[in-house]
Image: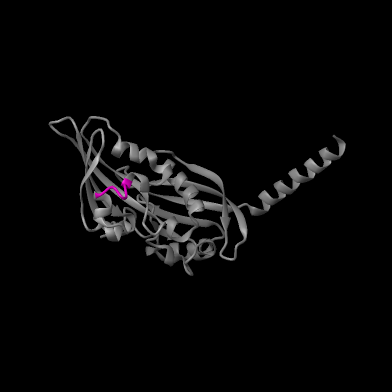
Amino acid sequence: MTQSTIRLILNESWQVLSVCDGIVELLGFRPEDFLTGAVTLMERIHPHDQDIAEIWFGCAREATRGALNVRVRQANGRIRCIKGEYDKSLTDSGGVVLELLLTDAKSLPRTLDDASATLNFRAMMENSDDYIYFKDRNHVFTGASQTLVALCDPAEHWSDLLGQTDYDVFPEEFADEYYRLEKQVFAGAPIANGIQETRSKDGRRGWIDNRKYPITNEKGELVGLYGIARDITERVLAESALRESEERYRSQYD
């Protein structure tokens, strides 16, 4: 399992107290990079996950603990999806000690079984015209349709996506949009949807109507999500052409 622990004290000028060696494999930085302040975890957190950063590094004087998913930029510039378990405790001097256990989401036990386990599912995944996918609670693929492979690099078969995150197979700007909807689902939304751009392996632009839904277990616990995205490229192009035609018509008579 790829993970590391970081211990900090949060006061007027918060200080890193310790970092374990696993940070090298997890993020590509050395422990001393954090200990000397050359690198800070806060600055490596994805800008759209500043809500998580505020929970971790905010100066609220209270003892709390929990687990949150967060995106962190590695030394190589790529985004890694991480589960961060945190424990904030109070010191006698009024400071707050923050202990973080950071684990690569792809190395965690799956909260949702791989959907490839049944023959019926495999048949559906290899013959559906829609983009269908399943992910566990940590944003890791547990199933996908073969059609999705046309948009993912590297991948040749839908099973190549199992155990990956969007940031492994999509351009970052697209992965950001897909993740944004997933945060809504994992925050309790019964559905999250949006019209989003795609780009095939050969560079062709397209658009999808992307819809994501929660998956719960028999206890009602949220363990993952599934999504169905439909190609609406022809509709988007037709609507764009119509708007351009209407604008040209108006410009002729204004």
Could you tell me which residue is drawn at 23 percent across and 42 percent down? 15
Left or right? Give the position of 207 relative to 71: right
Is 119 or 254 nearer to us in this picture? 254
Where residue 135 appears, as percent x and y from the top left, is 40, 54
Residues in magenta? 36-41
* Residue that lies at the very extreme toward the right in this rendered image: 253
- Residue at left offset 55%, top offset 57%: 130
Q: Is residue 37 magenta?
A: yes
Q: Quadrant of residue 201?
A: bottom right
Residue 3 highlighted magenta (yes or no): no
Q: Which quadrant of the figure has residue 246?
A: top right
Give how far across and how far down residue 179 sits, in percent: 45, 48
Observer-nearest residue: 154 or 27? 27
Q: How many marks?
A: 0
Residue situated furthest left in the rendering? 92
* Residue at image point 44% right, 62% down: 121
Q: Quadrant of residue 219?
A: top left
Q: Position of residue 149 (x, y in %)?
A: 51, 64
Residue at x 57%, y 62% (from the top left corner): 200
- In the rendered image, the quadrant that contains the C terminus is top right
Q: Is residue 223 visible?
A: no
